[in-house]
Amino acid sequence: MAAKAGGVEAVKAIDNLEAGAWQQPAVVAAAEAIHQLAVRGHILPGSEGLSHTEAQNAWCKGQVAFIPCGSWLEGEQQQVTPAGFDMVMATVPALTSSDKLPNGAVMAASSESFLVPAKAKNPQGGLEFLRYLFSKQVARGFAESAKALPVVTGATDGLTLTSGLGSVAEAVKAAGPNVFSYKFRTWYAPLSKAVDDATGELATKRINPQQWAERVQKAADAVAKDSSIVKHKR
């Protein structure tokens, strides 16, 4: 929601560890929206004590209407999802009447990284393995078994997609150029943990949106000042 309201520049400011990036109006407004879910009693009581699979199971049992989750959800739940439970992905809700990104914008990125070490005993063999791994044939099998969208263009052409995967594919296609993602989670583990910890406190009403923003900004500033951490730029 922060990205949709503040635009790609807001995302870049966060990833680039810019001063005050986590206290931008769009970011604080997004935190306020999440906080209001808790204040108004829209978060399942006790859900903070659930593992991610337990939370997903509660959703599949109809105990809650929505779950914030990645598109791995359908694949992880395929053994326990009730018949007729046709899950679909919702796009990012509008935060204001003047969001910088249009309705239909989605946060989407590959969630796994594959590397071939430069000093591996057989780097060419490693590269060939990646070539096979990202072939249309293997990517197609991945989509069928994991119920997740592969990164290989055209890999799902001609497939009859399940409800969840189909909705993801349609959302990404409809978003077109309005697909965004953050890099800070991959680049800066301490900041990622700080965001998760603070958001847990926010969603349980132990801190307010302003305190959330201050807490996360402090963590981002600490990363920015730490010379032992390699910095990246978007």
Image (cartoon, rainbow, N blue to C red):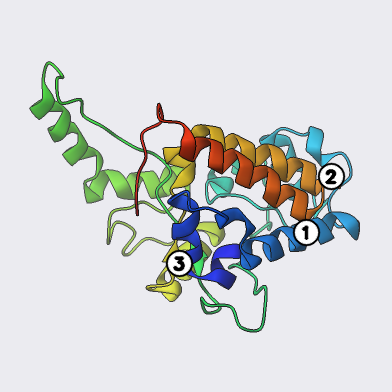
Say which mark, if any, is on residue 65: 1
Q: Nearer the viewer, residue 189 or 225?
A: 225
Nearest-to-viewer mark from 1 and 3: 3
Looking at the rendered image, the quarter that the C terminus falls into is bottom left
Determine whether the residue tagged by mark 3 lies in a helix, strand or loop: helix
How far across and how far down the image is residue 47, in percent?
81, 40
Dot 2 alpha-carbon crowd within 10 angstroms: few under 14, some 14 to 19, many 20 or more: some
Name the residue: 69% across, 37% down: 197
**In front: mark 2 or mark 3?**
3
Residue 163 locus on image (x, y percent): 55, 61
- SS type, badge 2: loop
Q: Earlier in the sequence, mark 2 or mark 3?
A: 3
Describe residue 150's horizontal placement relative to residue 119 as left or right. right
Furthest residue in direction bottom, as rendered? 97
Which circle marks residue 204 in the picture? Answer: 2
Left or right: 130 with respect to 112?
A: left
Q: Which of pointers 1 and 2 lies earlier in the amino acid sequence? A: 1
Amino acid at dot 1 = Ala
- Could you tell me the amino acid type at mark 2? Thr
Q: CA distance from mark 2 to mark 3?
A: 29 Å
CA gap between label 1 and label 2 equals 19 Å
- Residue at image position (37%, 44%) is 142
| Position of the N terminus by quadrant | bottom right
Q: Tell me how far mark 1 sits from mark 3, CA to CA.
A: 29 Å
Residue identified by numbered label 3: 8
Residue 15 appears in view? yes
**Residue lying at 48% horizontally and 60% vertically, measured from the top left:** 11
